[in-house]
């Protein structure tokens, strides 16, 4: 820029003249007078064109308060950096340039640097640099080693992140060092696999820097944490950028340039592979016609996208690809992928299977070289090819990238984004179908539902999960949703959502105390005490209600009325009767009720790896927990704890409610009265045998109401009040209890009980009704 003038004050115009005798005119510029003054001051202050990028960024970021960069956290961060963080790129440490002895490759490297310096003079340096055709041509030729880290930061926008967050990386390193998580364990496992042939990562210096960057990022972004391929990418970043710069480059790649790539489902990579397949159909139709299955391109190109060709190309060639990636984004990877397939078109068309095609591509990548690379032969991977592959024609990476730009440079970034949006839904639907298949396959082994019914139940369960997500922004289900979890844990519901499904699907939903039953059932399934259950737990309890034997159903009812499932429930609104509000339901679902023998279980929960807190996870505890689950024997009815008197009274009330409205209601009422009386007499006889010297008041006298047969027209509320008063008097007497075997044996003597619980129930009717009523029931609640 040679001059800045006010062109037309009436139209708020600004005229800018350049050395190339080209003038730019801008009109309707806001605050144009102040802008002209600032630009003139900047032109006068720019006595030398050689500005380092850090100076410009610091000036632009601190224009309001320039003193911020000289005081406080910045200096503290710099002092901390000198202690733990590497302040120069690994390439300058392990491959310093000898300025006195320049070979032909180093002379070319210096010529590249001079070309960039000329560009900086003409088009600006740092964040003020214009991107022109000449800039692209220089990037295609390969960025010089000395400028690579600086320009990567500039092109990716990471320079702005770093300048606006001084000292942030140092703080992350201090906080993350020493933490033990699944991510840190995976990082430790992969550290030695990151460019193991490079001397920088054969020493503790490079390994420690890589560990700090990956651990700091996992601490910054726990949603991503650490995924494979991040170590390979970061190791290359550390070669050409300082440690803090490498961290911000990793942030730019993972969070902006390659969104949704680095998670367990790699949705972003799968979406871009679908885009790649679409581009192949458009630009290479003959290859598409030859390949019967397009999934071949997805399987072979996954590593291309995840590692930006670093895993398939020699390191000296891969860095040239990264130059183009940081300049053009994912468009550069797509163009290069098309060029690779076109280059090998003839050989791929003669391949008879996928394995042969993979071999062709692998041999091609091994033949790619970088003839201008200044790296020493000991580091270059392309120079270490065996003699058996030397007959394959060499391909220079610069020529390959240039060809990809010439042939496929018309691919616009807007078109890529449009194809991403179009294919994203397809990819997610495919992943959801895979999740569904895996869940149904696992759950079908434990239930007796037909495949169709089980699939319908899964859809209802999943729909309830999503309704809970979108119905309420603050839903705990939304907070706990994590697509990277195992298949069974991806969709979970809380107690309120389970109550909706219980009312719609349970064969016992006609009970007066159905809310209490739903609450106790949820508490029984919530073994991890996180107030969430998965589909397997949901399907298994429904399967017991519908397809279980008499013993299974009775055992379920028994377990619902003893801790940890059972808790005293009473609505705060008497007008609602047994119905519970959402707040009451959530409150009762979170109550912790201890039972006999729970001390060992509570100890195990305290030592559970998930309860450790502060990001620390005990892997040995995970393994032991897994082993215990594998060795867990089938629950024996003798292992069930005994049911005390208040629990037995509630158990009897539930049976009364279950029998209400049944065709054999009168017979069932009589039978339960007989069984209750028999159980109490058995308990009295047992107590007398145990302690013949201590007189005990007969429990039969205090248990009158459950033994009575409810008369027609008698209000249930009055009987419940009577039972409640009797239970209050029982607390003053000696405790008595029943074992499950006693209740089972007594009920088996009454055929009407057996007929009731073994009566077949068809869940298909409930499912069809639930499809139509799921949203309405939720609205009422």
Image (spheres, rainbow, N blue to C red):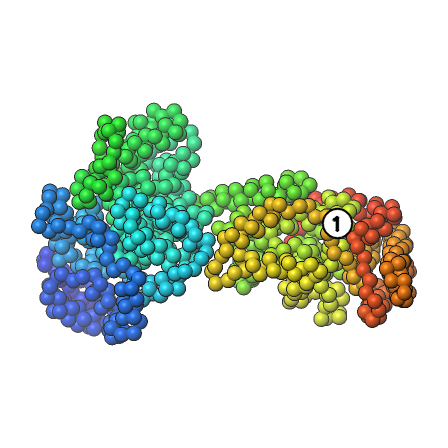
Q: Is residue 236 visible?
A: no
Along the line of sight, the residue nearer the viewer: 55 or 418? 55
Residue 311, image x and y in percent? 33, 41
Residue 569, image x and y in percent? 72, 65
Residue 638, image x and y in percent? 75, 50
Horizontal arrangement in the rendering, residue 50 relative to residue 211 (left or right): left
Quarter-wise, where is residue 49 in the image? bottom left
Horizontal arrangement in the rendering, residue 441 relative to residue 32 (left or right): right
Q: Residue at x 79, y 44 (%)?
A: 758
Q: Which residue is mark 1?
A: 637
**Label 1, residues with CA under 10 Å away: few <14, some 14-19, many ≥20:** some
Q: Residue at x 34, y 26 (%)?
A: 349
Q: Residue at x 79, y 53 (%)?
A: 740
Q: Tell how many labels.
A: 1
Horizontal arrangement in the rendering, residue 475 relative to residue 745 (left or right): left
Residue 4, image x and y in percent? 14, 67
Q: Secondary structure at mark 1?
A: helix
Q: Residue at x 69, y 54 (%)?
A: 502
Image: 382 above or below 44: above
Quarter-wise, where is residue 41 in the image? bottom left
Along the line of sight, the residue nearer the viewer: 239 or 128? 239
Q: Is residue 225 visible?
A: yes
Along the line of sight, the residue nearer the viewer: 129 or 226? 226
Quadrant in the picture for the N terminus: bottom left
């Amino acid at each position: 820029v040679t001059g800045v003038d006010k062109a037309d004050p009436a139209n708020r115009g600004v005229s800018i003249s350049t050395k190339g005798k080209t003038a730019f005119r801008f009109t309707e510029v806001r605050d144009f007078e102040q802008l002209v003054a600032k630009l003139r001051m900047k032109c006068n202050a720019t006595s030398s064109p050689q500005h380092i990028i850090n100076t410009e960024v610091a000036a632009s970021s601190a224009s309001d308060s320039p003193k911020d960069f000289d005081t406080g956290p910045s200096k503290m961060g710099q002092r901390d950096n000198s202690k733990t963080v590497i302040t120069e790129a690994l390439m300058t440490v392990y491959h310093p340039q000898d300025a006195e002895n320049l070979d032909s490759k180093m002379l070319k490297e210096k010529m590249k640097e001079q070309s960039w310096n000329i560009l900086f003079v003409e088009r600006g340096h740092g964040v003020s640099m214009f991107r022109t055709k000449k800039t692209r041509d220089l990037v295609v030729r390969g960025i010089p080693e000395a400028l690579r880290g600086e320009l990567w930061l500039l092109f990716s926008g990471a320079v702005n992140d770093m300048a606006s967050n001084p000292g942030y990386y140092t703080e992350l390193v201090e906080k993350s060092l020493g933490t033990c998580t699944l991510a840190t364990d995976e990082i430790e496992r992969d550290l030695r696999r990151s460019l193991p042939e490079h001397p920088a990562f054969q020493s503790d210096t490079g390994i420690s820097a890589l560990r700090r960057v990956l651990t700091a990022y996992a601490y910054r972004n726990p949603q991503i944490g650490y995924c494979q391929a991040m170590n390979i990418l970061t190791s290359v970043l550390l070669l050409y950028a300082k440690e803090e710069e490498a961290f911000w480059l990793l942030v730019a790649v993972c969070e902006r340039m390659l969104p949704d790539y680095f998670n367990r489902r790699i949705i972003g990579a799968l979406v871009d592979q679908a885009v790649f397949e679409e581009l192949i159909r458009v630009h290479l139709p003959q290859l598409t016609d030859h390949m019967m299955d397009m999934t071949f391109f997805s399987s072979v190109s996954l590593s291309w996208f995840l590692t930006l060709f670093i895993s398939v190309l020699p390191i000296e060639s891969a860095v040239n690809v990264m130059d183009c990636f940081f300049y053009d984004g994912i468009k550069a990877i797509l163009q290069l992928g098309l060029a690779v397939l076109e280059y090998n078109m003839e050989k791929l068309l003669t391949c008879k299977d996928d394995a042969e095609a993979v071999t062709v591509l692998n041999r091609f990548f091994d033949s790619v070289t970088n003839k201008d690379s200044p790296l020493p032969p000991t580091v270059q991977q392309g120079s270490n090819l065996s003699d058996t592959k030397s007959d394959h024609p060499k391909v220079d990476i610069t020529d390959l990238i240039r060809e990809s730009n010439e042939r496929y440079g018309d691919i616009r970034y807007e078109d890529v984004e449009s194809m991403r949006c179009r294919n994203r839904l397809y990819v997610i639907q495919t992943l959801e179908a895979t999740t569904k298949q895996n869940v149904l396959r696992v759950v079908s082994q434990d239930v007796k539902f037909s495949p169709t019914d089980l699939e319908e139940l899964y859809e209802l369960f999943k729909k309830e999960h999503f309704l809970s997500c979108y119905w309420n922004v603050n839903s705990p289900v939304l907070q706990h949703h994590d697509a990277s979890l195992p298949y069974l844990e991806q969709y979970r519901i809380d107690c309120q959502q389970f109550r909706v499904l219980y009312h719609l699907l349970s064969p016992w939903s006609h009970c007066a105390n159905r809310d209490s039953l739903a609450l106790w059932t949820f508490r029984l399934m919530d073994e991890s005490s996180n107030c969430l259950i998965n589909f397997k737990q949901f399907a298994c309890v429904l399967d017991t209600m519908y397809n279980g034997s008499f013993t299974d159903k009775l055992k379920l009812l028994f377990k619902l009325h003893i801790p940890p499932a059972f808790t005293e429930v009473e609505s705060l609104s008497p007008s609602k009767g047994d119905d519970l509000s959402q707040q009451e339901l959530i409150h009762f679902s979170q109550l912790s009720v201890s039972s006999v023998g729970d001390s060992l279980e509570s100890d195990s929960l305290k030592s559970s790896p998930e309860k450790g807190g502060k990001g620390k996870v005990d892997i040995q505890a995970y393994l032991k927990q897994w082993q215990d689950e594998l060795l867990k024997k089938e629950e024996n009815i003798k292992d069930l704890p005994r049911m005390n008197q208040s629990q037995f009274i509630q158990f009897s009330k539930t049976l009364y409610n279950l029998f209400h409205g049944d065709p054999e209601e009168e017979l069932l009422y009589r039978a339960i009265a007989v069984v209750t009386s028999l159980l109490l007499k058995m308990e009295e006889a047992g107590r007398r045998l145990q302690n013949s010297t201590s007189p005990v008041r007969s429990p039969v006298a205090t248990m009158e109401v459950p033994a009575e047969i409810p008369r027609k027209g008698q209000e249930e509320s009055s009987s419940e009040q009577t039972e409640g008063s009797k239970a209050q008097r029982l607390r003053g007497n000696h405790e008595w209890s029943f074992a499950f075997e006693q209740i089972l044996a007594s009920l088996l003597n009454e055929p009407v009980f057996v007929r009731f619980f073994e009566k077949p129930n068809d869940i298909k009717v409930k499912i069809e009704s639930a499809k139509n009523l799921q949203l309405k029931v939720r609205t009422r609640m």
